[in-house]
């Protein structure tokens, strides 16, 4: 009840006066009708979003009151009721304590920086256009923090999980930083259940070093004949690891398998084989794909058994992994088939594509039905060649090296199909020599987009463009994917190739190539990108034509180059035929670039332990 208000005295002077009388509520005023508040909050929100004209509010208006006002009154009452308290509920057991995290805490400055990045607040100073994009810097900060082995502050774990929930690209690094406490917290909030599915991509959890001394055999009792578990060695698996594998959630099992495989591939394979026959098809596919990082010849028996799996996707993945092992039996079978189709005759490569896709080819992962618009025989040939060990071609072609083989003429228009398959094989087998040969010189014209007329093995599957293809089309083959081939080269060679490509062709076709280069960019690559941007500015074009490359430069240039780039922030003279106002826009773009580089440098300094900061060389002038 509201306390009664007293009527003020008749005068402010001293002396006796009449006693004040309490103010009473008038009884002749009609009372307001109560608004129904039985509707749920979600129903009220839905009616407000759709509008009262499209949906009748779930409330009863007072006499003379319109529906929108009644809806707002009901929302106000519901808000007050929600804030006033909760309904009594049955007591639940308290959650178990959060597990300990032995990793060191973040330095104070780095902790404040993480809070700023998660809140999306810009650093002090800088205009609207020149302020760094904190959302793009958060992944890089998380990667650096994990490299130093820090743990996330407990108070920031909810915000970290919220950020990872909104952005899937953050999840591996965010969950790795959150560690076991992030997974513990995720079990208490359904909105963070993604963390239990992904498990930090195998980084948030490590295999326990103090696993129980008790061990068990790897192969399960009663495993069926022909099951991939038969191909796994019967090695001892620690009982603690086995318990986590058999009782954990899917994300936890993926993490355990990845960690065990990294420490001991044979134990990890035995762990997977122990439950293989009882796993769902989609889980078998994910577990099988996790073998890719630490693949070794000892995995071949298990993968050979997986070729007979009921799931087509599992069979295809097993075949792909086997083809990445040049010494596997599947690679030998594919090599025999390829040799029957491709030969060298008087210095010219001739091709006779397979006439059918038999059951043996299909068991080894060859997909019988081609994509729309692709000939069957060309489709089958490509799959055979890409699964053939690249070392075989040198022996078949008179000891020639990769560069010599790639330069050989190919009869009947099969060059594009054959070399496209070699490209896929070079990427799959991580073969540096073949990747280098197929890439060619960076000064060569960039690859043109594929066209129907340039695709050998068209819908009829009989061949390709023929010998009459124009020389220009042959100079820029559409089958070559430089970005994928570059991924097989060492980082320094990769950066130098892209730098030479940019110097020869500019930035128009360099975006995908820059995306596969190691971060931070090597000095020659960073200099080539900045020089190309400076040339574009002098040409009078607008900077947003290069916004993609500029965004990559903000995240990938060496932060120590910020002072050297300061000169580019000045507004340059515009050419007579240039775009109006382009100089000012370029100045803002370079200001943002320099500001972002300095912010990245500050992030690195805040994360570095004192010893690492002292050992880091001073930036070059």
Image (cartoon, rainbow, N blue to C red):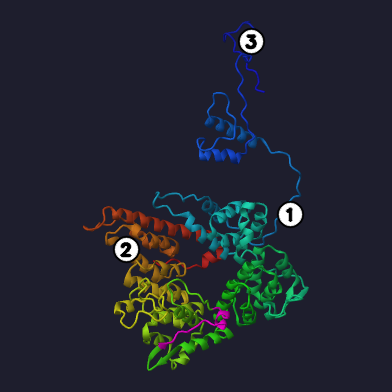
Q: Is residue 356 magenta?
A: yes
At horizontal 32% and vertical 63% (from top left) the residue drawn is 534
Query: Mark 3 or mark 2: which comes first in sequence?
Result: 3
Q: Nearer the viewer, mark 3 or mark 1?
A: 1
Residue 8: x and y in percent read 59, 13
At horizontal 21% and vertical 57% (from top left) the residue drawn is 576
- How packed is label 3: few (under 14 Cα within 10 Å), some, or many (20 or more)? few
Query: Mark 3 or mark 1: which comes first in sequence?
Result: 3
Residue 307 in view of the camera: yes
Q: Is residue 237 above or below residue 178?
A: below
Residue 208: x and y in percent read 70, 68
What residue range appears in magenta?
350-365
Alpha carbon separation for disc pair 3 and 2: 84 Å
Alpha carbon separation for disc pair 1 and 2: 59 Å
User: As rendered, which of 464 and 399 lies closer to the eye?
Assistant: 464
- How packed is label 1: few (under 14 Cα within 10 Å), some, or many (20 or more)? few
Is 413 situated left or right of 121 in this image? left
Query: Mark 1 or mark 2: which comes first in sequence?
Result: 1
Is 390 situated left or right of 44 in this image? left
Snapshot quadrant of residue 588: bottom left
Residue 157: x and y in percent read 61, 54
Identify the residue position indicated by label 2 in the image.
534
Q: Which mark is residue 20?
A: 3
């Amino acid at each position: 009840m509201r306390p009664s208000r007293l009527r003020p005295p008749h005068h402010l002077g001293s002396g006796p006066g009449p006693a004040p009388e309490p103010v009473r509520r008038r009884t002749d005023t009609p009372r307001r009708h109560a608004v129904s508040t039985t509707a749920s909050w979600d129903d009220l929100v839905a009616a407000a979003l759709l509008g009262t004209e499209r949906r009748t509010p779930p409330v009863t208006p007072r006499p003379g009151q319109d529906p929108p006002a009644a809806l707002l009154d009901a929302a106000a009452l519901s808000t007050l009721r929600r804030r006033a308290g909760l309904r009594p509920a049955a007591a639940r057991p308290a959650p178990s304590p959060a597990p300990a995290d032995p990793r060191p805490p973040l330095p104070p400055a780095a902790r404040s920086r993480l809070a700023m990045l998660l809140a999306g607040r810009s650093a002090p100073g800088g205009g609207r256009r020149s302020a760094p994009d904190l959302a793009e810097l958060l992944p890089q900060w998380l990667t650096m923090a994990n490299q130093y082995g820090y743990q996330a502050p407990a108070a920031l774990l909810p915000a970290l999980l919220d950020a990872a929930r909104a952005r899937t690209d953050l999840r591996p690094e965010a969950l790795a930083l959150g560690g076991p406490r992030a997974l513990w917290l995720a079990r208490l909030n359904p909105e963070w259940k993604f963390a239990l599915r992904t498990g930090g991509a195998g980084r948030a959890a490590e295999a326990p070093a103090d696993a129980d001394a008790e061990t068990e055999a790897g192969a399960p009792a009663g495993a069926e004949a022909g099951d991939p578990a038969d191909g796994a060695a019967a090695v001892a698996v620690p009982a603690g690891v086995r318990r986590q594998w058999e009782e954990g959630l899917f994300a936890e099992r993926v993490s355990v398998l990845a960690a065990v495989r990294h420490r001991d591939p044979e134990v990890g394979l035995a762990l997977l084989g122990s439950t293989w026959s009882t796993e769902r098809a989609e889980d078998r596919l994910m577990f099988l794909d996790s073998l890719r990082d630490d693949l070794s010849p000892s995995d071949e028996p298990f993968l050979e058994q997986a070729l007979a799996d009921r799931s087509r996707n599992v069979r295809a993945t097993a075949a792909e992994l086997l083809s990445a092992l040049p010494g596997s039996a599947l690679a030998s079978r594919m090599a025999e088939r390829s040799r029957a189709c491709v030969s060298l005759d008087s210095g010219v490569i001739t091709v006779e594509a397979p006439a059918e896709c038999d059951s043996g080819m299909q068991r080894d992962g060859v997909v019988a039905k081609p994509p729309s618009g692709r000939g069957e025989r060309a489709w089958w040939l490509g799959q055979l060649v890409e699964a053939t060990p690249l070392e075989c071609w040198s022996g078949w072609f008179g000891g020639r090296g990769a560069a010599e083989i790639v330069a050989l003429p190919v009869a009947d228009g099969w060059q594009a199909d054959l070399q496209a398959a070699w490209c896929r094989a070079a990427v799959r087998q991580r073969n540096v020599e073949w990747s280098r040969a197929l890439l060619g010189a960076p000064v060569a014209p960039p690859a043109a987009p594929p066209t129907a007329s340039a695709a050998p093995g068209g819908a009829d599957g009989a061949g390709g463009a023929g010998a009459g293809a124009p020389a220009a089309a042959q100079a820029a083959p559409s089958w070559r994917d430089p970005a994928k081939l570059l991924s097989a080269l060492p980082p320094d060679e990769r950066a130098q190739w892209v730098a030479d490509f940019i110097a020869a062709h500019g930035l128009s076709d360099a975006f995908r190539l820059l995306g596969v280069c190691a971060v931070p960019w090597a000095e020659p690559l960073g200099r080539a990108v900045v020089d190309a941007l400076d040339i574009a500015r002098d040409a009078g074009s607008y900077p947003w034509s290069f916004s993609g490359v500029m965004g990559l430069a903000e995240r990938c240039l060496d932060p120590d180059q910020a002072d050297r780039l300061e000169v580019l922030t000045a507004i340059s003279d515009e050419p007579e035929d240039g775009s109006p106002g382009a100089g000012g826009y370029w100045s803002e773009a370079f200001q943002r670039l320099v500001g972002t580089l300095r912010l990245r440098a500050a992030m690195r300094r805040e994360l570095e332990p004192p010893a690492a900061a002292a050992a880091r060389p001073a930036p070059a002038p």
